[in-house]
Image (tube, helix red, strand yellow):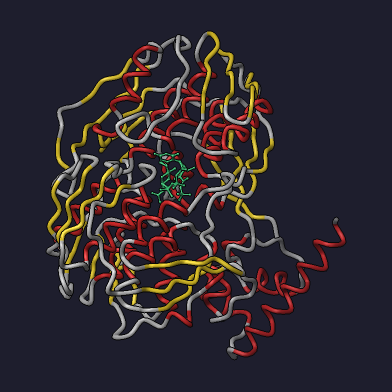
Amino acid sequence: MVGMTETYLSRIGNLIRDARRHKELTQAELAGLLGTSQSAIARIEQGKQNLSLEMLARIGESLDSEIVSVGSAVPQNLRITGGVKLSGEIDVRTSKNAAVALLCASLLNKGRTTLRNLARIEEVNRITEVLTSLGFKIRWLGESNDLEIVPPAKIDLAAIDEAAARRTRTIIMFLGPLLHRFDNFELPYAGGCDLGTRTVEPHMTALRQFGVDVTATHGSYHATVDASRRPTRPIVLTERGDTVTENVLLAAALHPGTTVIRNASSNYMVQDLCVFLRTLGVQIEGIGTTTLKVTGVEEIDMDVEYSPSEDPIEAMSLLAAGVVTGSEITIKRVPIEFMEIELAVLDTMGLQYELSEEYTSANGFTRLVDLRTIPGPLKAPLDKIHPLPFPGLNIDNLPFFAIIAACAEGSSMIHDWVYENRAIYLTELTTLGAKVHLMDPHRVMVEGPTKWRAGEIMCPPALRPGVVILLAMLAAPGVSVLRNVYVINRGYEDLATRLNNLGASIQTFRDI
Ligand SMILES: CC(=O)N[C@H]1[C@@H](OP(=O)(O)OP(=O)(O)OC[C@H]2O[C@@H](n3ccc(=O)[nH]c3=O)[C@H](O)[C@@H]2O)O[C@H](CO)[C@@H](O)[C@@H]1O
Ligand SMILES: C=C(OP(=O)(O)O)C(=O)O
């Protein structure tokens, strides 16, 4: 190993020396740019100095040369010193799931779309990459979290960044907007978290009424569109899914007639999308219900801004962080409508908390509160905990109940009927001392309370289970390591730093 590191360091040293000479800088001049000494540069170039990735990145910047690429190919890991109480306040960021819907909705607009206060997360990066490859001009406005999207005169689908597209499931929501632009097109298969098979059939069935026929071969969807076919009767969704509802909304937005969607999801991201579409001039009745009546427009060409609402799943994650570490923290900007059932279940488990008065999110629509956690003993609920489409306990919040159940006295049954694979990942918590028994692929029995212990775990390829493990590591005294956390970064902005601001001790590092 020592030998390998030496070779590696001297190879990097040579690269730095060559790049420096190419820029016609002396060692002293480069040292000046980096605020270090000439002798340090000499050691680096000889491969005799250990280098942090941050230093490498700074050297690369000074020399206008990426010495080593530290893109997503190099996994990011977290080292967590746990068993520390958290304190203070944290804001819930805006939601990943509204962000992806709004990014897809920007495909409808020929004008400029500015999305305010978007979470800077990998999922947003992937869709931004895809849109950029299609010809969109996209930029973050300065240091802010505001994203400006300017469409091209003509979308170049042949140039699509397939690698980025395949890393997200969201690509499926391009079908709704694109069916108005093309008679015939291809999209790469939807990817995303590995939660087992996730059907796209409901999307295909619903969009058929808009004249779309899709065949799937060789990793691509091939869509043909018969523009003379438009909905003549209500579109009844076969399941109350969030993205399928959004896909139909996106299709209906550019259909000048009226589309009725039945068994629509009324979940938070759908509500956000509806409010946004309204600002684009689309009429929508029934927001927050399971019947949406949409009257679209021929064309959308306006400069528009929108601020999506706060993420209820992040709110739940932060609440779980407070519970598992036995801490008093204040979680600000909690979208309360989408946490009520979760809190009602937690009430039965004996959770104590305080809620502030309500106030309104920047979208002018969603109701927010601040929530203060109050540490205390918890007990297992008498009934199983299971999710339902909204209004029900949110499907993505379910994994957080596993870790809260692990802190409670008694046995809790967690039933994840939705995903084929997700409950299985919860058994990773046993490495950290939890008693999690897999009854079948969908049900785990959790016995608490847990005496957490530190451990080293490869992050499961699924967002929420990944975060659940991270939170357990916060509770476990000692040093834990969570490897390859791309999936967490897919949905949470800078979670480590933000938890550190509450007193956690999480270091980010990479293996190279
Ligand atoms: C970008 C985005 O918004 N993603 C969310 C969205 O994904 P999305 O809308 O893509 O969810 P899926 O279509 O994959 O649905 C999730 C699973 O639930 C099943 N199902 C869903 C509804 C229903 O009434 N009956 C039923 O059986 C589906 O068959 C599937 O197995 O919804 C999921 C379920 O809330 C969330 O986990 C995702 O975070
Ligand atoms: C499953 C999730 O998201 P996605 O639909 O983006 O895979 C999630 O947010 O937990």
Residue 446: percent from the left, percent from the top? 58, 18
For the N terminus, the image quarter is: bottom right
Please state if 506 lies on the left or on the right of 381 as rendered: right
Please state if 349 lies on the left or on the right of 29 as rendered: left
Instruction: Decide which of 47, 84 is in the foreground and name it.
Output: 84
Residue 371 drawn above or below residue 132 = above
Ligand 1 in which quarter: top left
Residue 359: percent from the left, percent from the top? 14, 36
- Tell me the residue at 40%/72% (across/down): 131
For the C terminus, the image quarter is: bottom right
Residue 55: percent from the left, percent from the top? 59, 64
Residue 469: percent from the left, percent from the top? 57, 34
Instruction: Decide which of 23, 154 is in the foreground and name it.
Output: 154
Which picture quadrant has residue 65? bottom right
Total labels: the figure holds: 0
Please state if 58 lies on the left or on the right of 18 as rendered: left
Instruction: Decide which of 36, 3 is in the foreground and name it.
Output: 3
- Tell me the residue at 14%/60% (across/down): 295
- Tell me the residue at 37%/79% (across/down): 183
Which picture quadrant has residue 107? bottom left
Please state if 420 lies on the left or on the right of 9 as rendered: left
